[in-house]
Image (cartoon, rainbow, N blue to C red):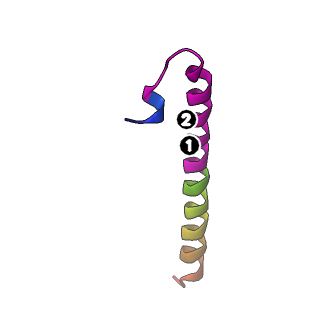
Amino acid sequence: MSHCDVFDGMWVKYDANLCMNLVLVLLLMIHLIVIKMEGLIMRIPN
């Protein structure tokens, strides 16, 4: 059961914010991984 599944009264706002934060963290991690991958590719001589 994920935090996004709980929408009940006062918990709706809290869970929505938590889900948004999780999404933002995931996007940030993916962004950092992409930057690192690009850095590695740039170092490899063609």
Spot occupied by residue 41 in the image (x, y as percentages of width and height) = 54, 74
Q: Residue at x 46, y 25 (%)?
A: 6
Q: Residue at x 54, y 49 (%)?
A: 26
The amino acid at mark 2 is Cys
The vertical placement of 45 against 12, above or below, is below
Quadrant of the image occupied by residue 32: bottom right
Q: Residue at x 56, y 29 (%)?
A: 15
Residue furthest top as drawn: 9
For the residues bearing labels 2 and 1, Cβ distance under 8 angstroms: yes
Which contiguous range is marked in magenta? 5-27
Spot occupied by residue 17 in the image (x, y as percentages of width and height) = 62, 31
The residue carrying mark 1 is: 22
**Horizontal side of residue 29 vs 5, given as left or right:** right
| Mark drawn on residue 19 | 2
Q: Does 7 appear in magenta?
A: yes
- Disc tally is 2
CA neighbours of label 1 inside 10 A, class few (<14), some (14 to 19), many (20+):
few
Q: Kindly state the secondary structure of the residue where label 2 is placed.
A: helix
The amino acid at mark 1 is Leu
